Image: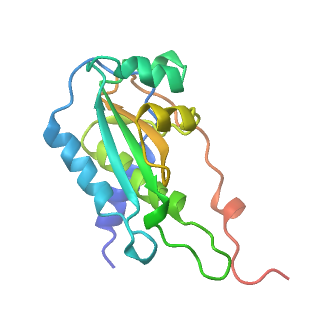
Amino acid sequence: MDFSAYTRFHALAQDRRSCRDYLSTPVDRSLLLAILDAARLAPSAVNRQPVRYIVLDANDPGVRDMILKVYGRQWIATAPVYIIAVGMHGQAWHRPCDGKDHTDVDVAIAVEHLCLAAAALGLGSCWVCNFEAPELHRLLGMPDDEEPVAVIPVGYPAETDVPRRGRKSLDEIVQWGLKA
């Protein structure tokens, strides 16, 4: 069995970090299109694809202030681009037995594709969920059935050699077979 593709993927997944310090260097649109295309390819429940992206240039008037208003940590102001991952609840699959809305699951898969693609292209990203979602919803003039699920700052990392936070071992997270 050839593990070469897995080895490359594992290295990418292992090396990817949440970036919290960016260079001011602009990100070329072709790179942004590439990472957005990777997100577009993400699977979703019943292939509903209930996600869209709002790409904001931090140098556009009012953008940094808006992001800082909904997420007040100063490190985020260093990013040159913000991608808002928007979940579209009206388009998502809802599980018939209990009505569970899979928007968040579908957006999560797509955002991880985006973050891994960014890392593969030498860009840093950070998945930010601790923001004032109702206020961002209002500021962006979004329809009622849409929700900003994540703010993803993107840019060239200024940080170097950031240690990876510990991960649980496989023994801590895997159960083989039925529990006795």
* Residue drawn at (80%, 80%) of the image: 179
Residue sitting at 71 percent across and 60 percent down?
172
In which quarter of the view is residue 87 placed? Answer: bottom left
Q: Name which quarter of the figure residue 152 lies in.
A: top left
Residue 88 position within the rendered picture, expressed as x and y whole percent measured from the top left: 44, 57
Task: Identify the image quadrant of residue 57.
Answer: top left
Picture coordinates of residue 55 (x, y %)? 29, 38
Image point (70%, 73%), residue name? 175
Residue 136, position as x, y percentages in the image: 48, 33
Looking at this view, name the residue that lies furthest to the right: 180
Comparing 55 with 169, the one in front is 55
Would you say 136 lies left or right of 121 here? right
In the rendered image, the quadrant that contains the C terminus is bottom right
Decide: is 57 above or below 108. Answer: above
Q: Is residue 11 above or below residue 127?
A: below
Position of 173 compared to 132: left or right? right
Q: Residue 154: percent from the left, percent from the top?
A: 34, 33
Query: Considering the image in quadrants, where does the N terminus appear?
Result: bottom left
Nearest the viewer among 58 and 162 is 58
Q: Residue at x 30, y 49 (%)?
A: 117
Q: Is residue 74 above or below residue 150?
A: above
